[in-house]
Image (tube, rainbow, N blue to C red):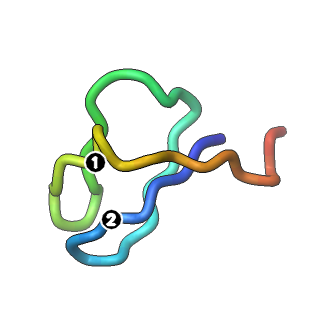
């Protein structure tokens, strides 16, 4: 899983894919250019 932190609201967003458009689920900020981090839980 990939995780991004929203710089606008500090919410955490998770996805199984790091490509494509990525929007914050809380404030709808465009997170596409925010660097993602790999989470520990990769089940």
Q: Which residue is mark 2?
A: 6
Residue at horizontal 45 percent and vertical 65 percent from the top: 12
The count of marks equals 2
The residue under label 1 is 31
Residue appearing at x 71%, y 52% in the figure:
39
Q: Residue furthest bottom?
A: 9
Residue at the image position 49 percent from the left and 30 percent from the top? 18
Q: Can you say whether 38 is above or below 18 in the image?
A: below
- The relative height of residue 27 versus residue 9 in the rendered view (above or below) is above
Secondary structure type for disc 1: loop
- Which of the 4 image quadrants contains residue 21? top left
**Are the two marked residues, 1 and 2, in contact with CB atoms closer than 8 angstroms?**
yes
Relative to 13, say whether 2 is above or below: above
- Label 2 secondary element: loop
Q: Is residue 33 left or right of residue 1?
A: left
Dot 1 or dot 2, earlier in sequence = 2
Q: Quadrant of residue 42?
A: top right
Q: Position of residue 13 (x, y in %)?
A: 44, 56
Pointer 1 local density, CA inside 10 Å: few below 14, some 14–19, many at least 20: some
Residue 5 image point, x, y percent: 42, 64
In screen coordinates, is 5 left or right of 24?
right
In the rendered image, residue 10, in percent from the top left (x then y), is placed at: 35, 77
**Residue 7 pos. (x, y %):** 28, 69
How far separated are the C-alphas under marks 1 and 2?
7 Å
Closer-to-camera residue (20/33): 33
């Amino acid at each position: 899983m990939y995780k991004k932190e929203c710089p606008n609201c500090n919410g955490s967003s998770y996805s199984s894919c790091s490509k494509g458009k990525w929007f914050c689920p809380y404030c709808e900020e465009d997170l596409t250019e925010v660097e993602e981090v790999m989470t520990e839980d990769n089940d």
